[in-house]
Amino acid sequence: MNNNKLVQTSTSDGLILHGYYVPSKDKRIAVLQVHGLAGNFYEDTFTHIFAQEFEEQSIGYLTANNRGNGKDMDFNKVNGDSVRIGSQYELLEEAHLDITAWLKILIDEGYKEIVLMGHSAGSVKAVRYLFEGELKDKITKLILLSPIDVLGFRLAKGRIDIDGFLKQAQMKVDEGKGNELITSEFDHDTLSYKTFISWYRRDDLGRMFDFFDKDYDFQILKHINIPTKILVGSNDEYFHPSNPSHPQEAMDILLKNISNSKGKTIEGAAHSFKPYENVMVKAVSSFVLD
């Protein structure tokens, strides 16, 4: 009989979050999974495969919601109030609050090593945590599953005036209308003006996977110094949208700029790693235990 269980935590700004925890026997090493845009801790097809694999390998596993859960969600707060967030209203600069809350559970459980693993947009949050997180020094390894080039995906669909859109969005924020939703010409996704700025801001954190710009120097990636594993599918339309038939080009950029990194492209796999979830999970397990 296992001890797997649903868990909840609260962030320093009072949000109540939920997740699923698979404890290990020896409490030596654990993986914290950060889900992608509008996702949750349970729906990815590989989640239950991770749970089974990690339990068999005595690796702790915590797959957890963050404030980007769903598109437009009401989150309960510890004071009894609620607040509407979800991917339409979340701010990337607040993502570290959620990860810290979950890390505290693993630290309290006594794990000696903690691996931070992000899928899709969760990869952006995982990398940001290494620079913004209160407990960033507790992270011993990093795993990036299907990292997403957000701006590149937009640019690949046609030229856009991203600087002009950012200026317009900032004007809305300055007018006190930052929580209003952007109009259709801004983005194919429904986002608030604040969230649009958070995702598309042209600083180094915002450009960490900016493969579209051939002259960009990836300063954030150059400062990652912990062992890192990158896994993508060859059929992932979000990974390298500026040259989708050659995902290895983007993989090579990551491997070149993250000094202590290894990468694997899984032939035929999609953004969610279907139908090769087992191949991805085995590669992750091997890296964690290495």
Image (cartoon, rainbow, N blue to C red):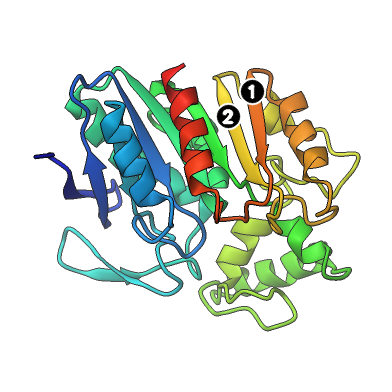
Dividing the picture into quadrants, the one containing residue 250 is top right
**Closer-to-camera residue (235/99):** 235
Q: Residue furthest bottom?
A: 184
Task: Between residue 58 and residue 79, name the one nearer to us.
Answer: 58
Quadrant assignment, res 288: top left
Q: Is residue 283 left or right of residue 209?
A: left
Q: Answer above or below: position of 144 versus 87.
A: above
Q: Which residue is mark 1?
A: 261
**C-alpha span from label 1 to label 2:** 6 Å
**Residue 202 versus residue 86 in the image, above or below:** above
Name the amino acid, label 2: Lys
Picture residue at 52% right of the left edge, 32% below the top: 283
Q: Is residue 80 left or right of residue 261?
A: left
Q: The residue under label 1 is which amino acid type?
A: Ser
- Decide: marks 1, 2 in contact (CB < 8 A)? yes
Q: Which mark is residue 289?
A: none
Residue 33 at x, y percent in the picture: 40, 43
Which residue is rendered at x = 47% and y = 24% of the image? 286
| Residue 212: x %, y % from top left | 84, 50
Q: Position of residue 231 (x, y in %)?
A: 60, 38
- Please name the residue shown 37% across and 46% down the image: 49
* Above or below 134: residue 238: below
Quadrant where the image shows the N terminus: top left
Q: Along the horizontal axis of the image, is 112 left or right of 187?
A: left
Mark 2 element type? strand
Judged from the image, the secondary structure of the residue bearing numbered disc 1 is strand
In which quarter of the view is residue 29 placed? top left
Where's residue 161, x and y in %?
85, 68
- The residue positioned 44% from the left and 60% from the top of the image is 68
User: In this figure, what is the number of numbered marks?
Assistant: 2
What's the mark number on residue 229?
Answer: 2
Sequence-first tag of 1 and 2: 2
